[in-house]
Image (tube, rainbow, N blue to C red):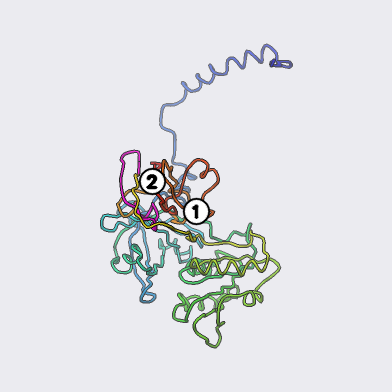
Amino acid sequence: MELNLKGLGKKDMAAFKELPKNREKIIHSSSSSPIRTDYVANEIGALLHPTVQHVKVVDIIEENKNTKTFVLGPNIDAGTKKLAYFRPGQYISIEVPIESGLYRRPYTISCSPKNVFDNLYTITVQRKPRGIVSNYFLDSVEVDDTFTISGPMGNFYYEPLRDARNVIALVNGRGITSILSMAEAIKDGILDFKLTILYSARAERDLLFKQELEEISRKNNLIHIEYILSDEDKEEYYYGHLSKEIIEPFLEPETSFFVSGTNAFLESTNAVLKEFNLPNKYIRHDAFFGKVDLFGNDPYTVTVITSEKEYTLTCHHTETLLSAMEKEGIPTNSRCQVGECGFCRSKLKSGMVRTIDGVLRKADEENEFIHPCVAFPESDVVLELPF
């Protein structure tokens, strides 16, 4: 293949030849002082997207016997002066040392972004059977306890460029926290869209934040709430389960759905939404831990390789690799716990694991990368962490 130099003169070639020399002259003549980083844009970026935030518990509100709301403020002594702004529906990942273990759990910020101007977040924790972190929060955490958390994360928020102005939120259980945050933001004038909340529960006593939601609804005509009870037949409540017939009266030509709740609720709700033949862009899901079929009874040996140390631990087939690492106090880089954020992405050096369907990207599968937060061992495993 011949190089066509037509159109290039001798002066052009000479100038091209001198480019490296000119570049070196510029480099050597430049100042040796450190590059400036104290630009306003850098300061705003650090404030909006901090790697870590240090917080302390400033108040605890008991919602019911199995649920508490924790009010978090900045831990100035540890270096955090201001909490990062967030979008309603986002979560923070909180690091919780319990005995010899080190756990990270995601919790939705349940207040309005307006609270950030008072330097406050709220998270709501509901007790789970055998929930190590949730039980610790409800039984042991007190005012003035301190924690390390991430910056706000997640994509479960309203975006006017993407979502319809008419929104129907389909929720149950603790899934109401993200929708409460959106309702508060509408009340405060931060968001501007029409929000209908179809809130499912077994009984009236299970409706978290019912009083708060109704007060918001009374003060703002953009927010409307209906309740569906499966175990109680009461006046002014729908009785049974969420259905196409309940949803239809609130539909408009363009409607976005925000779905948040337990695994079983999300699966049954998706089945109902299929009846409307909606484009995928109109259905938003809060991240959740899907189902996975697990087989076998034996515990397996897991070797974890980091840049500084190698660990050996035991992991049962019914617990995730991340869970086993947390119990041993192995430092992990995790956030969402449902295979979405990619922070815990690690190399599977050897062994077999079973992961939740649809979690892994194709490139990860081809190059043997997994997300330990949603990976269950099916043999002895060697795992290399990215740090």
Q: Residue 348 lies in what quarter of the image? A: top left
Spatial separation of the CA atoms under disc 2 and disc 1: 22 Å
- Quarter holding the C terminus is top left
- Quarter holding the N terminus is top right
Q: Residue furthest left?
A: 99
Mark seen at residue 379? none
Q: Is residue 15 above or below residue 312?
A: above
Q: Which residue is mark 1?
A: 340
Can residue 322 be found in the magenta stretch?
A: yes
Asked if disc 2 and disc 1 are in contact, CB closer than 8 Å, the reply is no
Name the residue located 47 percent from the left edge and 25 percent from the top edge: 30
> What amino acid is found at the position of numbered circle 1 in the picture?
Glu
Which residues, given as a range, are shown in magenta? Answer: 304-324
Task: Kindly report which numbered mark, 2 or 1, lies closer to the viewer in this rendering.
Answer: 2
Q: Residue 66 lies in what quarter of the image? A: bottom left
Q: Residue furthest bottom?
A: 235
Q: Which residue is mark 2?
A: 381
Q: Residue furthest top?
A: 10
Mark 2: which secondary structure?
strand
